[in-house]
Image (cartoon, rainbow, N blue to C red):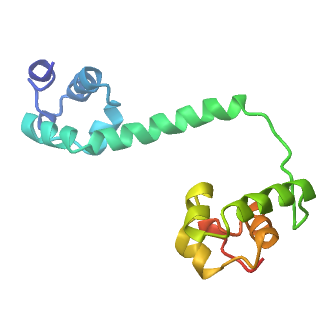
């Protein structure tokens, strides 16, 4: 496929060159025209380093996203705004108490960064439950809870 596609060079003005190359390697011809190879070796180098793949995957990703958007349904999200189910708080506090407040163990169990737990230690099981349930230990939402 390489020999037949590269038998002409892009410099010759052969428009068919990009079409054949694009077909052989599943690359849109416009992409090849935008970043044209000088010769077969240059094409191979650009192809192997991802020059064409990156651009192809972006356009492919955009098409895939449009398809997926058409099948998504709108949903309502719970907005807790500090309101927690008491049963959830009690259950989480029991887990805290069972581990005797051991921050290392709690971090492993709940997938929380232990440094973040140490930086913002809970006062007790209920405080821990409240912070976890309100996502206070999430990396992007470190806040005073």
Residue 11 in the image: state x and y as whole percent: 13, 38
- Nearer to the camera, 94 or 76: 94
Residue at 82 percent of width and 55 percent of height: 91
> Considering depth in this image, is 99 or 141 the residue closer to the camera?
99
| x and y, in percent, of residue 52 in the image | 29, 40
* Quadrant housing the C terminus: bottom right
Identify the residue shown where x is 40% and y is 38%.
57
Q: In the picture, which quadrant includes the N terminus?
A: top left
Query: Closer to the camera, 60 or 117?
Result: 117
State how many labels appear.
0
As displayed, is residue 1 above or below residue 81? above
- Judged left or right of residue 3, residue 110 is right
Residue 131 appears in which quarter of the rendering?
A: bottom right
Give the residue drawn at x 59%, y 67%.
139
Q: Position of residue 6 (x, y in %)?
A: 12, 26
Give x and y (percent) for residue 127: 79, 73
| Residue name at image x 70 percent, y 30 percent | 70
Side of 69 relative to 94 (left or right): left
Q: Is residue 29 left or right of residue 46?
A: right
Asked if residue 101 is positioned above or below residue 59 in the image, the reply reads below
């Amino acid at each position: 496929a390489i020999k037949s596609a590269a038998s002409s060079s892009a410099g010759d003005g052969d428009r068919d060159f990009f079409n054949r190359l694009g077909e052989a390697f599943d690359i849109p011809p416009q992409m090849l025209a935008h970043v044209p190879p000088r010769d077969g070796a240059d094409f191979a180098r650009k192809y192997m380093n991802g020059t064409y793949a990156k651009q192809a995957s972006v356009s492919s990703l955009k098409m895939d996203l449009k398809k997926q958007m058409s099948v998504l349904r709108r949903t309502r999200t719970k907005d807790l705004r500090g309101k927690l189910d008491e049963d959830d708080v009690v259950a989480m506090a029991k887990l805290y108490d069972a581990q005797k407040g051991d921050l290392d163990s709690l971090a492993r169990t709940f997938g929380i960064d232990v440094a973040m737990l140490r930086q913002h230690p809970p006062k007790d099981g209920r405080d821990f439950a409240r912070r976890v349930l309100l996502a206070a230990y999430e990396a992007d939402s470190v806040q005073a809870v």
